[in-house]
Amino acid sequence: MCSPQSAIPPRLNSRPSSSHNLVIRQLQLARNPIGRLVLLRRSEADLAKLADRIVVLVKANAKGVNAETIKRTLKIERKELARPLAMALGSKKITKRGKKRATMYFRT
């Protein structure tokens, strides 16, 4: 189970990358009915704030950025990135070119 000092499962807590563990600890976790740790739902305001941070990052880089760079710069998990990125694209604040891992995001 979990150590009493943290709400992080031992499996995640034992990873070698200290920066990864730091990101995991900043996430809001809760237990589901089965007892497993899950991410709490984010509010629309939280999603919009993250989308704005993505737009600022993309506009600061004229050559464009990929999702891995956005994830690394903003220190967020991969699964946290998809929805705010889709919101920024949907509002036409940024554009994208390429497919799959070669996708680059540019300012409009």
Image (spheres, helix red, strand yellow):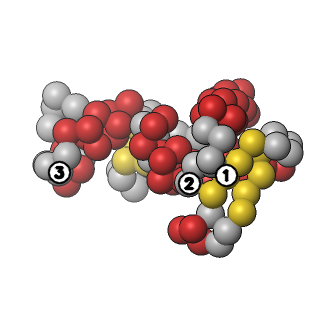
Q: Which of marks 1 and 3 is nearer the N terminus?
A: 3
Q: As drawn, is 40 to the left or to the right of 36?
A: right
What kind of element bears circle 1? strand
Q: Disc 3 to disc 2, how far (Cα)? A: 25 Å
| Residue 27 can be seen, yes or no | yes
Q: Which amino acid does label 1 sit on?
A: Tyr
**Observer-nearest of 26 and 60:** 60
Residues 103 and 28: in front is 103
At x 71%, y 48%, the residue is: 106
Left or right: 70 in relation to 35: right
Question: In the visual, does 70 lie left or right of 88?
Answer: left
Amino acid on which disc 2 is placed: Asn
Q: In this view, does 100 lie to the left or right of 51?
A: left
Marks 2/1 in contact by CB < 8 Å: the verdict is: yes
| Tag 1 residue | 105
Write down the residue under mark 2: 66
How far from the left and from the top, in percent, is residue 26? 38, 30
Q: Which of marks 3 and 2 is nearer the N terminus?
A: 3
Q: Which amino acid, mark 3? A: Arg
Which residue is located at x 58 percent, y 49 percent?
A: 65
Q: What element carries label 2?
A: loop
* Numbered disc in front, either 3 or 2: 2
Q: Is residue 3 above or below residue 103?
A: above
- Distance between the Cα atoms at labels 1 and 3? 30 Å
Q: Mark 3 — residue?
A: 15
Q: Position of residue 20 (x, y in %)?
A: 29, 43
